[in-house]
Image (cartoon, rainbow, N blue to C red):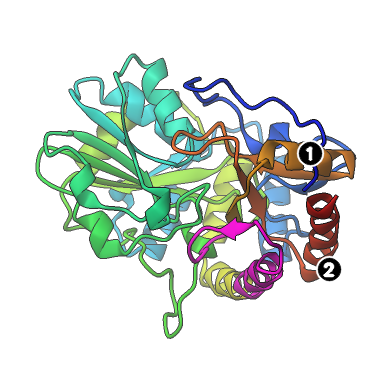
Amino acid sequence: MSDQPRTAAPTAGAEPDLAHHGDAEATAGLIDLAVNVRRAPLPDWLADPITATLTDLARYPDPTPARTAVAARHRRHPDEVLLTAGAAEGFVLIAQALRGVRRPVVVHPQFTEPEAALRAAGHPVERVLLDPAEDFRLDPGLVPDDADLVMIGNPTNPTSVLHPARTVAALARPGRVLVVDEAFADTTTAPGHTGEPESLAERRDLPGLLVLRSLTKTWGLAGLRIGYLLGAPDLLARLAAVQPLWAVSTPALAAASACASPVAVQAERAIAADLAADRDHLVARLADLPGVRVVGRPASAFVLLHLTGASWVRAALRERGWAVRRGDTFPGLGPDWLRVAVRDRNTIDAFIEVLREIMEA
Protein backbone atom coordinates (compact mmCIF):
# COMPACT_ATOMS: atom_id res chain seq x y z
CA MET A 1 0.00 0.00 0.00
CA SER A 2 1.11 3.57 -0.60
CA ASP A 3 1.54 6.31 1.98
CA GLN A 4 -1.74 8.00 1.01
CA PRO A 5 -3.64 9.81 3.81
CA ARG A 6 -5.63 7.41 5.95
CA THR A 7 -8.61 7.84 8.20
CA ALA A 8 -7.68 8.42 11.82
CA ALA A 9 -7.60 5.35 14.03
CA PRO A 10 -9.47 5.40 17.34
CA THR A 11 -7.59 6.98 20.21
CA ALA A 12 -5.42 4.49 22.06
CA GLY A 13 -7.29 3.13 25.04
CA ALA A 14 -10.66 4.38 23.72
CA GLU A 15 -13.64 2.27 24.75
CA PRO A 16 -15.10 0.29 21.81
CA ASP A 17 -18.50 1.40 20.55
CA LEU A 18 -20.62 -1.56 21.65
CA ALA A 19 -23.71 -0.14 19.92
CA HIS A 20 -22.12 -0.24 16.45
CA HIS A 21 -23.31 -3.05 14.17
CA GLY A 22 -22.78 -4.09 10.58
CA ASP A 23 -26.00 -2.57 9.31
CA ALA A 24 -24.47 0.86 9.93
CA GLU A 25 -21.77 -0.03 7.39
CA ALA A 26 -24.08 -1.38 4.69
CA THR A 27 -25.55 1.88 3.50
CA ALA A 28 -27.63 2.10 0.33
CA GLY A 29 -25.71 1.73 -2.90
CA LEU A 30 -22.87 -0.37 -1.47
CA ILE A 31 -22.29 -4.07 -2.04
CA ASP A 32 -22.86 -5.49 1.42
CA LEU A 33 -20.11 -7.65 2.91
CA ALA A 34 -20.70 -6.13 6.36
CA VAL A 35 -23.92 -7.86 7.46
CA ASN A 36 -23.96 -11.60 8.14
CA VAL A 37 -27.54 -12.18 6.98
CA ARG A 38 -28.09 -14.47 4.00
CA ARG A 39 -30.07 -12.79 1.24
CA ALA A 40 -32.13 -15.22 -0.83
CA PRO A 41 -35.82 -15.62 -1.67
CA LEU A 42 -37.74 -17.40 1.09
CA PRO A 43 -38.68 -20.98 0.19
CA ASP A 44 -42.42 -21.64 -0.09
CA TRP A 45 -42.45 -23.80 3.03
CA LEU A 46 -41.33 -20.72 4.99
CA ALA A 47 -42.95 -17.86 3.10
CA ASP A 48 -46.42 -19.43 2.92
CA PRO A 49 -46.94 -19.93 6.70
CA ILE A 50 -45.70 -16.39 7.39
CA THR A 51 -47.99 -14.90 4.76
CA ALA A 52 -50.96 -16.93 5.98
CA THR A 53 -50.79 -15.27 9.40
CA LEU A 54 -51.45 -11.82 7.93
CA THR A 55 -55.19 -12.54 7.76
CA ASP A 56 -55.29 -13.51 11.44
CA LEU A 57 -53.55 -10.68 13.24
CA ALA A 58 -56.54 -9.68 15.37
CA ARG A 59 -55.78 -12.50 17.77
CA TYR A 60 -52.96 -12.34 20.30
CA PRO A 61 -49.97 -14.54 19.48
CA ASP A 62 -49.99 -18.11 20.82
CA PRO A 63 -46.40 -19.39 21.22
CA THR A 64 -47.38 -22.97 22.10
CA PRO A 65 -47.12 -24.58 18.63
CA ALA A 66 -43.82 -22.88 17.86
CA ARG A 67 -42.36 -23.75 21.26
CA THR A 68 -43.36 -27.38 20.74
CA ALA A 69 -41.79 -27.46 17.27
CA VAL A 70 -38.51 -25.93 18.43
CA ALA A 71 -38.36 -28.30 21.38
CA ALA A 72 -38.84 -31.31 19.11
CA ARG A 73 -36.03 -30.16 16.84
CA HIS A 74 -33.57 -30.05 19.74
CA ARG A 75 -34.92 -33.14 21.51
CA ARG A 76 -36.13 -31.10 24.46
CA HIS A 77 -39.34 -30.55 26.39
CA PRO A 78 -41.34 -27.41 25.46
CA ASP A 79 -40.74 -25.89 28.89
CA GLU A 80 -37.02 -25.88 28.00
CA VAL A 81 -37.67 -23.35 25.20
CA LEU A 82 -38.25 -19.61 25.49
CA LEU A 83 -39.07 -17.83 22.22
CA THR A 84 -37.72 -14.29 21.83
CA ALA A 85 -37.98 -11.33 19.47
CA GLY A 86 -34.58 -12.11 17.99
CA ALA A 87 -31.43 -13.15 19.79
CA ALA A 88 -30.86 -9.58 21.00
CA GLU A 89 -33.95 -9.76 23.22
CA GLY A 90 -32.51 -12.89 24.80
CA PHE A 91 -29.46 -10.97 25.98
CA VAL A 92 -31.67 -8.27 27.49
CA LEU A 93 -33.79 -10.84 29.34
CA ILE A 94 -30.67 -12.48 30.77
CA ALA A 95 -29.30 -9.14 31.93
CA GLN A 96 -32.58 -8.09 33.51
CA ALA A 97 -33.49 -11.40 35.12
CA LEU A 98 -30.07 -12.24 36.58
CA ARG A 99 -29.46 -9.06 38.53
CA GLY A 100 -28.22 -11.05 41.49
CA VAL A 101 -25.02 -12.25 39.82
CA ARG A 102 -21.84 -10.93 41.40
CA ARG A 103 -19.16 -11.44 38.77
CA PRO A 104 -20.42 -11.49 35.16
CA VAL A 105 -17.76 -12.23 32.55
CA VAL A 106 -17.96 -11.80 28.78
CA VAL A 107 -15.41 -13.65 26.64
CA HIS A 108 -14.19 -11.40 23.81
CA PRO A 109 -13.91 -10.77 20.94
CA GLN A 110 -17.58 -11.56 20.40
CA PHE A 111 -20.91 -9.99 19.51
CA THR A 112 -21.18 -6.81 21.56
CA GLU A 113 -24.87 -6.97 22.51
CA PRO A 114 -24.36 -9.35 25.48
CA GLU A 115 -22.03 -6.89 27.19
CA ALA A 116 -24.12 -3.90 26.17
CA ALA A 117 -27.24 -5.49 27.68
CA LEU A 118 -25.42 -6.30 30.91
CA ARG A 119 -24.06 -2.78 31.26
CA ALA A 120 -27.47 -1.26 30.53
CA ALA A 121 -28.88 -3.33 33.41
CA GLY A 122 -26.19 -2.02 35.77
CA HIS A 123 -23.91 -5.07 35.83
CA PRO A 124 -20.16 -4.48 36.34
CA VAL A 125 -18.87 -6.48 33.39
CA GLU A 126 -15.46 -8.15 33.37
CA ARG A 127 -13.85 -8.96 30.02
CA VAL A 128 -11.76 -12.01 29.22
CA LEU A 129 -9.80 -11.26 26.03
CA LEU A 130 -8.70 -14.22 23.92
CA ASP A 131 -5.26 -14.12 22.33
CA PRO A 132 -4.98 -13.24 18.61
CA ALA A 133 -1.66 -15.11 18.52
CA GLU A 134 -3.70 -18.23 19.38
CA ASP A 135 -6.32 -17.38 16.74
CA PHE A 136 -8.72 -16.43 19.55
CA ARG A 137 -9.18 -20.04 20.65
CA LEU A 138 -10.88 -20.48 24.00
CA ASP A 139 -8.78 -21.26 27.06
CA PRO A 140 -11.24 -22.06 29.88
CA GLY A 141 -8.51 -21.32 32.41
CA LEU A 142 -8.76 -17.62 31.59
CA VAL A 143 -12.25 -17.41 33.06
CA PRO A 144 -12.20 -16.66 36.80
CA ASP A 145 -13.36 -19.60 38.91
CA ASP A 146 -15.84 -17.44 40.81
CA ALA A 147 -17.50 -15.95 37.72
CA ASP A 148 -21.20 -16.71 38.19
CA LEU A 149 -22.29 -15.59 34.71
CA VAL A 150 -20.17 -16.34 31.63
CA MET A 151 -21.13 -15.38 28.08
CA ILE A 152 -19.42 -16.69 24.94
CA GLY A 153 -20.25 -17.12 21.26
CA ASN A 154 -19.82 -20.37 19.32
CA PRO A 155 -19.09 -20.00 16.49
CA THR A 156 -17.96 -16.58 17.57
CA ASN A 157 -18.83 -13.35 15.83
CA PRO A 158 -16.57 -11.69 14.58
CA THR A 159 -13.73 -14.24 14.65
CA SER A 160 -15.58 -17.14 12.95
CA VAL A 161 -13.86 -19.47 15.43
CA LEU A 162 -15.75 -22.65 16.29
CA HIS A 163 -14.68 -23.79 19.76
CA PRO A 164 -14.83 -27.52 20.57
CA ALA A 165 -18.02 -28.37 22.47
CA ARG A 166 -16.01 -30.04 25.23
CA THR A 167 -13.98 -26.85 25.74
CA VAL A 168 -17.08 -24.67 26.05
CA ALA A 169 -18.78 -27.26 28.26
CA ALA A 170 -15.79 -27.10 30.60
CA LEU A 171 -17.00 -23.63 31.60
CA ALA A 172 -20.21 -25.01 33.12
CA ARG A 173 -20.39 -25.60 36.87
CA PRO A 174 -22.90 -25.41 39.72
CA GLY A 175 -23.67 -21.85 40.77
CA ARG A 176 -22.79 -20.40 37.34
CA VAL A 177 -24.99 -19.48 34.39
CA LEU A 178 -23.18 -20.26 31.14
CA VAL A 179 -24.66 -18.47 28.12
CA VAL A 180 -23.54 -19.82 24.75
CA ASP A 181 -24.55 -17.67 21.79
CA GLU A 182 -25.14 -20.13 18.93
CA ALA A 183 -26.71 -17.61 16.55
CA PHE A 184 -24.48 -18.96 13.77
CA ALA A 185 -24.42 -22.64 14.73
CA ASP A 186 -26.61 -23.51 11.76
CA THR A 187 -23.88 -22.24 9.40
CA THR A 188 -21.30 -24.79 10.58
CA THR A 189 -20.29 -28.13 9.07
CA ALA A 190 -17.70 -30.82 9.66
CA PRO A 191 -16.59 -33.85 7.63
CA GLY A 192 -18.62 -36.91 8.60
CA HIS A 193 -20.98 -34.86 10.77
CA THR A 194 -24.61 -34.61 9.65
CA GLY A 195 -25.67 -32.01 12.19
CA GLU A 196 -24.20 -28.89 13.78
CA PRO A 197 -20.72 -29.72 15.04
CA GLU A 198 -19.85 -28.46 18.52
CA SER A 199 -23.39 -27.31 19.35
CA LEU A 200 -24.61 -27.66 22.94
CA ALA A 201 -28.27 -27.15 22.01
CA GLU A 202 -29.25 -30.68 23.02
CA ARG A 203 -27.17 -30.85 26.19
CA ARG A 204 -29.39 -31.09 29.28
CA ASP A 205 -26.69 -32.31 31.68
CA LEU A 206 -24.69 -29.10 32.06
CA PRO A 207 -25.65 -26.99 35.09
CA GLY A 208 -26.76 -23.44 34.36
CA LEU A 209 -26.48 -23.78 30.58
CA LEU A 210 -28.42 -21.34 28.40
CA VAL A 211 -28.06 -21.74 24.63
CA LEU A 212 -29.20 -18.81 22.54
CA ARG A 213 -30.26 -19.33 18.92
CA SER A 214 -31.29 -17.07 16.05
CA LEU A 215 -33.35 -17.77 12.93
CA THR A 216 -32.58 -14.44 11.29
CA LYS A 217 -29.19 -15.22 9.70
CA THR A 218 -29.59 -18.25 7.46
CA TRP A 219 -33.21 -17.54 6.57
CA GLY A 220 -32.92 -13.79 6.02
CA LEU A 221 -35.44 -12.88 8.73
CA ALA A 222 -33.60 -10.04 10.47
CA GLY A 223 -36.61 -7.78 9.99
CA LEU A 224 -39.01 -10.32 11.50
CA ARG A 225 -37.09 -10.74 14.78
CA ILE A 226 -37.20 -14.35 15.91
CA GLY A 227 -34.88 -16.39 18.12
CA TYR A 228 -35.04 -18.57 21.21
CA LEU A 229 -33.29 -19.72 24.36
CA LEU A 230 -32.78 -23.33 25.44
CA GLY A 231 -32.20 -24.25 29.06
CA ALA A 232 -33.56 -25.63 32.30
CA PRO A 233 -37.24 -24.74 32.96
CA ASP A 234 -36.54 -22.96 36.25
CA LEU A 235 -33.89 -20.75 34.66
CA LEU A 236 -36.06 -19.94 31.65
CA ALA A 237 -38.96 -19.10 33.98
CA ARG A 238 -36.84 -16.36 35.53
CA LEU A 239 -36.22 -14.89 32.09
CA ALA A 240 -39.85 -15.23 31.04
CA ALA A 241 -40.90 -13.28 34.14
CA VAL A 242 -39.22 -10.13 32.79
CA GLN A 243 -40.29 -10.61 29.16
CA PRO A 244 -43.10 -8.38 27.89
CA LEU A 245 -46.41 -10.09 27.13
CA TRP A 246 -46.75 -11.33 23.54
CA ALA A 247 -43.16 -10.36 22.77
CA VAL A 248 -43.00 -12.56 19.66
CA SER A 249 -45.39 -11.72 16.84
CA THR A 250 -47.69 -14.22 15.14
CA PRO A 251 -45.73 -14.12 11.83
CA ALA A 252 -42.48 -14.70 13.73
CA LEU A 253 -44.01 -17.66 15.55
CA ALA A 254 -45.05 -19.15 12.22
CA ALA A 255 -41.47 -18.76 11.02
CA ALA A 256 -40.14 -20.50 14.13
CA SER A 257 -42.41 -23.48 13.57
CA ALA A 258 -41.48 -23.74 9.91
CA CYS A 259 -37.73 -23.42 10.55
CA ALA A 260 -37.87 -26.25 13.11
CA SER A 261 -39.35 -28.73 10.64
CA PRO A 262 -37.36 -31.63 9.14
CA VAL A 263 -37.62 -29.99 5.72
CA ALA A 264 -36.03 -26.84 7.12
CA VAL A 265 -33.23 -28.69 8.88
CA GLN A 266 -32.38 -30.58 5.70
CA ALA A 267 -32.36 -27.35 3.68
CA GLU A 268 -30.26 -25.66 6.34
CA ARG A 269 -27.60 -28.37 6.12
CA ALA A 270 -27.44 -27.96 2.33
CA ILE A 271 -27.08 -24.19 2.69
CA ALA A 272 -24.29 -24.68 5.25
CA ALA A 273 -22.44 -26.99 2.84
CA ASP A 274 -22.67 -24.46 0.02
CA LEU A 275 -21.55 -21.72 2.40
CA ALA A 276 -18.49 -23.77 3.40
CA ALA A 277 -17.47 -24.11 -0.25
CA ASP A 278 -17.88 -20.36 -0.85
CA ARG A 279 -15.97 -19.62 2.36
CA ASP A 280 -13.10 -21.85 1.27
CA HIS A 281 -13.02 -19.96 -2.02
CA LEU A 282 -12.88 -16.61 -0.21
CA VAL A 283 -10.09 -17.79 2.09
CA ALA A 284 -8.09 -19.13 -0.85
CA ARG A 285 -8.41 -15.87 -2.76
CA LEU A 286 -7.44 -13.82 0.30
CA ALA A 287 -4.34 -15.98 0.72
CA ASP A 288 -3.06 -14.51 -2.56
CA LEU A 289 -2.99 -11.01 -1.10
CA PRO A 290 0.24 -10.10 0.69
CA GLY A 291 -0.22 -8.50 4.07
CA VAL A 292 -3.66 -10.00 4.69
CA ARG A 293 -4.06 -12.65 7.40
CA VAL A 294 -7.24 -14.67 7.80
CA VAL A 295 -7.80 -15.71 11.40
CA GLY A 296 -7.53 -19.45 11.99
CA ARG A 297 -9.94 -21.76 10.16
CA PRO A 298 -13.17 -19.78 9.70
CA ALA A 299 -16.27 -21.84 10.45
CA SER A 300 -19.19 -19.50 9.85
CA ALA A 301 -20.69 -17.02 7.38
CA PHE A 302 -17.83 -14.51 7.74
CA VAL A 303 -14.06 -14.30 8.08
CA LEU A 304 -11.91 -12.03 10.22
CA LEU A 305 -8.94 -10.32 8.58
CA HIS A 306 -5.90 -8.66 10.05
CA LEU A 307 -4.06 -6.12 7.92
CA THR A 308 -2.10 -3.00 8.71
CA GLY A 309 -4.06 0.11 7.79
CA ALA A 310 -7.41 -1.69 7.79
CA SER A 311 -9.25 1.54 8.65
CA TRP A 312 -7.89 3.17 5.51
CA VAL A 313 -8.64 0.08 3.42
CA ARG A 314 -12.23 0.03 4.65
CA ALA A 315 -12.67 3.68 3.68
CA ALA A 316 -11.15 3.02 0.26
CA LEU A 317 -13.48 0.07 -0.26
CA ARG A 318 -16.47 2.27 0.54
CA GLU A 319 -15.32 4.76 -2.09
CA ARG A 320 -15.26 1.88 -4.57
CA GLY A 321 -18.76 0.70 -3.59
CA TRP A 322 -18.05 -2.05 -1.04
CA ALA A 323 -19.04 -2.29 2.63
CA VAL A 324 -17.10 -4.43 5.12
CA ARG A 325 -17.36 -4.51 8.91
CA ARG A 326 -14.86 -2.50 10.94
CA GLY A 327 -13.17 -4.39 13.77
CA ASP A 328 -12.31 -1.67 16.23
CA THR A 329 -15.76 -1.71 17.88
CA PHE A 330 -15.15 -5.23 19.18
CA PRO A 331 -13.29 -5.49 22.52
CA GLY A 332 -10.04 -7.33 21.93
CA LEU A 333 -9.61 -6.12 18.35
CA GLY A 334 -8.62 -2.72 17.00
CA PRO A 335 -8.21 -0.60 13.85
CA ASP A 336 -6.21 -3.27 11.97
CA TRP A 337 -9.10 -5.75 11.80
CA LEU A 338 -11.95 -6.22 9.32
CA ARG A 339 -14.79 -8.72 9.14
CA VAL A 340 -15.95 -9.83 5.70
CA ALA A 341 -19.17 -11.73 5.05
CA VAL A 342 -19.09 -14.76 2.75
CA ARG A 343 -20.99 -14.27 -0.50
CA ASP A 344 -21.25 -16.14 -3.82
CA ARG A 345 -18.09 -16.75 -5.81
CA ASN A 346 -18.71 -14.06 -8.43
CA THR A 347 -19.12 -11.46 -5.70
CA ILE A 348 -16.05 -12.79 -3.89
CA ASP A 349 -13.91 -12.61 -7.04
CA ALA A 350 -15.02 -9.05 -7.76
CA PHE A 351 -14.29 -8.03 -4.18
CA ILE A 352 -10.81 -9.57 -4.24
CA GLU A 353 -9.88 -7.67 -7.38
CA VAL A 354 -10.97 -4.35 -5.86
CA LEU A 355 -9.16 -5.14 -2.61
CA ARG A 356 -6.03 -6.06 -4.55
CA GLU A 357 -6.09 -2.78 -6.42
CA ILE A 358 -6.45 -0.85 -3.17
CA MET A 359 -3.66 -2.79 -1.48
CA GLU A 360 -1.32 -2.22 -4.42
CA ALA A 361 -2.13 1.48 -4.84
Q: Position of residue 49 (x, y in %)?
A: 66, 55
**In the rendered image, the vertical position of residue 149 relative to residue 155, given as above or below:** above
3D distance between C-alphas at marks 2 and 1: 31 Å
Residue placed furthest toward the left: 174
Q: Disc count in the image? A: 2
Task: Using residue 49 as the reference point, say whether residue 347 is left or right of it.
Answer: right
Image point (86%, 36%), residue name: 28
Three-letter residue code for mark 1:
Asp
Task: Using residue 356 as the reference point, say whether residue 154 is left or right of it.
Answer: left
Three-letter residue code for mark 2:
Asn
Q: What label does residue 3 carry, if any?
A: 1
Q: In which quadrant of the rendered view does residue 319 lie?
A: top right
Residue that carries the numbered disc 2 in the rendered image: 346
- The magenta segment: 274-302
Closer to the observer: label 2 or label 1? Answer: 1
Image point (54%, 63%), residue name: 187
Q: Earlier in the sequence, mark 2 or mark 1?
A: 1
Residue 88 seen by the camera: yes
Helix, strand or loop under label 1: loop
Task: Using residue 216 as the reference point, say whether residue 209 is left or right of it.
Answer: left
Task: Using residue 10 as the reference point, say whether residue 131 is left or right of it.
Answer: left
Quick one: label 2, few (<14), some, or many (20+) residues within 10 Å? few
Magenta-drawn stretch contains 281:
yes
